Image: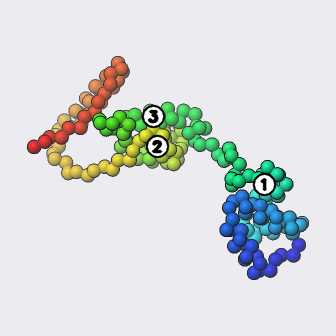
Amino acid sequence: MKPHPFKVEQQMQQFYHSLSEKDRRRYAAIEAVKLGWGGITYISRLFGCDYYTIRFGIHELDDESAMKMKEVRRSGGGRKSALETIEGLETAFLKVIAQHTAGSPMDEQIKWTNLNRQEIAKLLKNEGITVSVTVVDQLLVKYNYRKRKAQKRLATGEHPQRNQQFENIEKLKIAYQKVGNPVLSMDTKKKN
């Protein structure tokens, strides 16, 4: 097999990179078939594509249904979503985020969490489920959580029993929820 002149190789590479994934595979296959023995290896090196991608392209050229396909990939291809494949993911997510959820008293559809994506992923890992922050993003969108920007304010003073009151509220909240009562969170501001 005789390689193409350098100028022709440059033009072929430029054309190859202007194509879609499907068309690249098929173009590489045609060029490899034209060259005969050693063509796949040569074209694979020239275009920087995988040997088996070219082999797949060659099989596609002989497949009438593949040649009629308009999409870049066949439907149903690719990896399934983590939301579909990881058993117990959504239950664990809701459990992890339950104690860190707040929402609008005016609209029950608006809710947010004080945890960031990395913290949620770490808490899920503690539950035995390892996921990326991308999966956490998908879960936040699915369960209608909104981004909320924290506002920095100067503290107006410290009270020695400040933490005690929040611990008491948490105990009451858990007790009410155990017997099936709803819990409302009210944020009140003093108006002058």
The residue lying furthest to the top in this view is 179
Q: Earlier in the sequence, mark 2 or mark 3?
A: 3
Marking on residue 124: none
Considering depth in this image, is 109 or 146 the residue closer to the camera?
109
Left or right position of 22 against 139? right
Q: Earlier in the sequence, mark 2 or mark 1?
A: 1
Q: Which residue is mark 2?
A: 141
Residue 67, which numbered label?
1
Q: How far is mark 2 from mark 3, CA to CA?
A: 13 Å
Secondary structure of residue under mark 1: helix
Quadrant of the rendering where the N terminus is positioned: bottom right
Q: Amino acid at mark 1?
A: Met
Crowdedness of circle 1 by 10 Å Cα count: few (<14), some, many (20+)?
A: few
Nearer the observer: mark 2 or 3; the answer is 2
Colour scheme: rainbow
Q: Percent x, y for residue 57?
A: 79, 58
Label 2, label 1: how far apart the Cα atoms are: 37 Å
Q: Quadrant of the C terminus?
A: top left
The structure residue drawn at horizontal position 69% and vertical position 65%, both measured from the top left corner, is 19
Residue 175 can be seen in this image:
no
The percent position of residue 56, horizontal first and vertical second, equals: 79, 55
| Image coordinates for residue 184, horizontal then vertical, percent | 29, 30
**Vertical relation: 78 (above or below) 165:** below
- Report which residue position mark 3 lands on: 94
